Every structure is written in C-alpha cells, then in structure tokens.
Amino acid sequence: MKKNIIACAVSMGCLFANVPTTLAADTPTSDAIVYHVTFPYSNDQTTIDTLGLNTQYASSAIMSNIIAGVMYTHMIKKQYPELQFNEDDMTTTLLGQLLQESGLHEAIMNTDFSPNQATQAIHNPDFKKILLSAGQGGPYQINDYSKRLPDANSPGSLGLINYDAVRKTLDYTIADQDSGKQTSSLGPDALDDMYFAPMTAAFYRFNDINRMKQLASNDWYVNKEAWDTCWTNLSDPLLAEDPNALRLTDFILNVVYNAGSYSAPLQSYLNVCVKKDPAQLANMNNYNLSPQDYRDAIGSSDTTGDTYYRYPRQVSFYIDQLFGVNLEDAGLNINNQVSLLAGQFNRVFAFAVTKLSYKPNKDKEELTFVTASQADKAFKDALAQLDIKSTDSFTLSNDSDRKAIYQLLDVAIGNVEKAIGSDFNAVTDKGPIDPTSEIQIYTDAKIQGQMFLSASKAGANIVNNWMTPNTHISLPVDASIDQMKDSGVDCTAQAQSAFAKLASEADPEHPQQINVNFQNNSCMISIGDYTPDVPVPPVPEGEWDPAKVYDKPCEKVLHNGLSYHNQWYTTGEEPTPEASANWGVWRIVGKDSDMCTN
C-alpha cells in the first residue's frame, strides 16, 4: 500500500521534521533496537532512532506485537494451511512494521504509559493526532484500512471492518467503509492502542492475502501469472528445506503491504519467487548492499525509489536485533538479551483479546466482546496443556524459547475460539452498499456529451463531478441533487425525482440504483436493480482513458494504434480518425489539424 504522510519510509523526514532523532554518537551497544536505518548500515546515519528495551513500555509493545503476530500466523494456518513461511519472521513482522512506519522512541512515545491499564495509547497526544488524521492508518500506516481491497467493486473484496473480531472496537460500520465516510474521517483511537492496534495490523495483513487472491482471479491482472506461480512455490513443503527460499513469503507479503499490488517492486520479488535462483535468494536479505547493487543481486531492472526495496530488510534487521543476532558483519555492534515471563504474556494477552469481538448468534448482527474470564482461562489452560508455569521465563535470543512462546500463544488463541464458538477470521460481508444510507448513481458506458452533477448535504456541497462513462457516484440518502446538466439541457428534475423515490422506498433486500444516460440531447434517467461494477483492467499508462478528465490541451494518448492530442478540455469522447479529420477534440498527432504540433 502506498503511503501519504509517511511516504518517506526511510528518512521519515516528512513526519519527523520536528522530532529529534538519536545522534550517531549515542548509538547503543546493548538493550536497544536501532531503527530507521538505510543499507549498508553505519553508525553515522542521521536517520537513526532507538527503542530502549529495559522498560515496561517496550516490553508491553514487544509482547502485544508478538501476540498479534501469532494471531496473524494462526489465521493463515487455518485459512491457507498450504502456505510455507518462516515462523520467526512472519510472527514478528508487525513489530518491525511499527518501528519503521512510526517508531517507539522517547520523543514520540506515550510517557504516561501504565502497564496495568487495559487501554493505553502507543504514542503521545500530538504524534497520535498526526497518525490518526484522515487518510492515515495509525502507527502501522495501514492507510487503506477504511476500504475494501483490492477495490470496492470486485467480488470477494474485504476491508478491515468486515472482520467480526475487530469491528466492535473500531466502532464504525461496514456502510461507513463502503460509502467512503470512514476514509474522510479521523481514524479511531483504537488504531493507536498498545494492545489493539497490533491486532488491526494483523488482520489487515491477513486480508492482504485475500486481496491478492481476488486480484489474481482476473486474467487482466498484470501479475496474475507470476502470483499464481509464486503461490504454488510458496505452498511447496520442500520450501522449508531452504532457509533463504522460506523468506520469500514474508518478503512478498511485506512488499504487497508496503509498495502495493501493482508496484514494480512486487513484480521484482515475484520474479525472484518464480525463478527461485539460489544466488538471488541468498541476497534477498543482504544488509551490506547499496541500493543499486541490491537490485542487481535480486535481478531487478526497476528504477523506482529505493524505499520499497529497503523495507523488508529493515523489518528483518530490527527483529534480528531483538533476537540477539550478531550483526557485526552488517556494521552494527549490539547485543540484546530480552527475557519475558509467561505471566507477563498472560496479562497482555487478556488486554488484547478482550478487545476482540464475535457473533454469539451467527444469524444476527450483534457482536459481543471476549470476556476477561474467557481470555484468562484460555491462556491458563494453554499453560497447563503445554506444562508451562506462569513463572517460566523465555529468552528471545533462544530459538526453542521463541518457539515455545509461539506455541503457547497459538494454543491460547485456539482455546478462546473454542470458548466463543467462532473463528477469529470470521467475516461479515453485507455486500458493497446499504440502500438505507446511500444511493448509487451510475453513468452509462456510452453516454454522449459531458453531464455535470452537483449535490449537497445540509447546505454544504459534497459533489461536483463530471459524469464520465462508467462513473459510479455514491450519495448519502439525506443528500440532495442540486443540478445535473449537459450543454444547456437540464436533467435536474428527473434526477431529483429518481433520487427522492429511492430515498423513500429503500429496501435492503432489493437495492436499486439510478442509471444515467444522455443521447441525442435527451435525458435518459431510470431506476433499476443494483448491479455491482464489473471490474475492468486498469488502462495502460499513455493510452486513452474514457473515464479520465483531460483538462489541459495537448495531452498525448494512444488509441487503436494511433497517437492523438486533445485540443481542449474533454472527457469520455473517444479519439477516432473520423473525428480528427472533422476538427474534433482529438486530432492525430502530426496532422495539419493538430494545433499542438503546428
């Protein structure tokens, strides 16, 4: 997913311009994680921040993210049991994401943190306000949390709010998601909660797999073949025999999250997955390569920014520090030994899981929270099942201790599911619209001219759009259409009448829509059964896009093998040789009629 405010994921300068960073001279040698680094790493990098590990704040953050990470892998094992992955790196990827995308250093942390309170902000109020502004996705920068992915119109698309487990705490509705209301609203406080925020990241990242599978079900998806082949490779049990190849899963899912499903970096890593070249796999997590050397090493010819190729390695670099891996060869001399008690995990587990919800009756919409007694019993039962005492200590630098933690948490999560009679990956999908709260307006694919729509709500204008071919506009049911016009022909009255009818007769069981066409100077507005948009492949860069507004003259497009320039503002009008010869808006490049080259 591409970033907005935190787009500069390495320097973080756009977000941290006024936040002091750790000076190179202060780079610690123990009890800390150094992050916001570039590669090759050196102690004199000015972007460095550090998380001190010997605090209750740090311990709580580590435990809550490991618990959410186990929830992530628990759901994957349940829904995609064939998928092979490195348990350490998949389980702790959320902590690495948190460190890279926002951070946990002193200048931005919640200094009022109390380990015994169930609801705690991760960050201080000023920084939290930035992270929860409209269009942002909290400290994990899950900026598309408020949307269905891959898009609102593809069958099978789901958003974060469709997952029953997180919907009650997030406290907005599926209708808020599908109408776009939540996207334009401030993020819920829960997105920055120490114990719940990691869970939102876990469910978001889990949903990325569904996102990719839905995209790859379409023949037009540019990465369909590579994704399908890669998924087959990632599902091969033999993958586990090659530690380098086993890292493909967390790398690719990190790139899907960080760069997006259409990105060039994803194509590069999918190619690595398809080829499984031993040399490329060996260099995939190489911390010592410069940006260009790294691309060369993994066989990428991509020339886009370095950020997306650093991100998976940054996440890995931070977790290696947490696990006490010797990184002297990578330029960092730091030695960490983090130990945590089973009883500490019990406390954090209860804080996290009691913020999750489920449907006690699958036939009803009502959600209820997991109770503290259910969470506590599930954890204590897991202790007994695995013969672990609450006073037992686990050291994160010890492989067997980490595996024991993951197993304990996985069993505890399973125990909760048994107690509530529901799996945590359960979803509610009412479909893309709620006709009692929003009315859909669709423009015909072959509409002539340039219909303009203006609408308002409570006296404030909310829509001023040209209704280009295949336009889909969603209006709140309490909005009003102010005008719908084209070249002097006024269709406003017909549009208002249709809107009023749907607003007063909305039937959730049989949703309807307003269909808008305009042919031969005649308004053609009708009401019909709601039909979701048919997903269409994106228009290749440089080709004519029937839905695009060409508001500047002399934009060059390719259509049916010919290049055209628009001579003035246009939208929806198809370039043709006939129109070019008759002085239409689109003229063939280089012809006498093309004023852009003459």
Image (tube, rainbow, N blue to C red):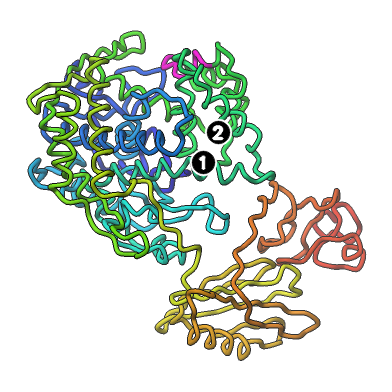
Q: Residues within 10 Å of mark 1 (few under 14, many from 20)?
A: many
Which residue is painted at 29% across and 57% down in the image?
170
Q: Alpha-carbon distance for marks 1 and 2?
A: 7 Å
Toward the viewer: 242 or 525?
Answer: 242
Upstream in sequence: badge 1 or badge 2: 1
Labels 1 & 2 near each other (Cβ < 8 A): yes
Q: Quadrant of residue 490?
A: bottom right
Looking at the rendered structure, the kind of residue marked 1 is: Gly
Q: Which residue is mark 2?
A: 266
Q: Is residue 180 above or below residue 279?
A: below
Numbered range of the magenta stretch: 281-288
Where does residue 306 sit, x and y in percent of width and height?
Answer: 49, 29
Q: Residues within 10 Å of mark 2 (few under 14, many from 20)?
A: many
Where does residue 404 sit, x and y in percent of width and height?
Answer: 23, 22
Q: Is residue 353 above or below residue 293?
A: below
Placement of the C terminus among the 4 image quadrants: bottom right
User: SS for tag 1?
Assistant: loop
Which residue is painted at 40% across and 65% down in the image?
176
Which residue is painted at 60% across and 85% down in the image?
495
Where does residue 472 sit, x and y in percent of width and height?
Answer: 59, 68
Q: Magenta-highlighted stretch: main secondary structure? A: loop
Q: Is residue 362 above or below residue 387?
A: below
Q: Quadrant of residue 34?
A: top left
* Residue 593 is inside the magenta segment: no
Toward the viewer: 387 or 355?
Answer: 387
* Residue 286 is inside the magenta segment: yes
* In the image: residue 99, left or right of residue 585: left
Q: Which residue is mark 1?
A: 260
Q: Is residue 411 above or below residue 421?
A: above
**Does residue 462 show up?**
no
* In the image: residue 277, left or right of residue 242: right
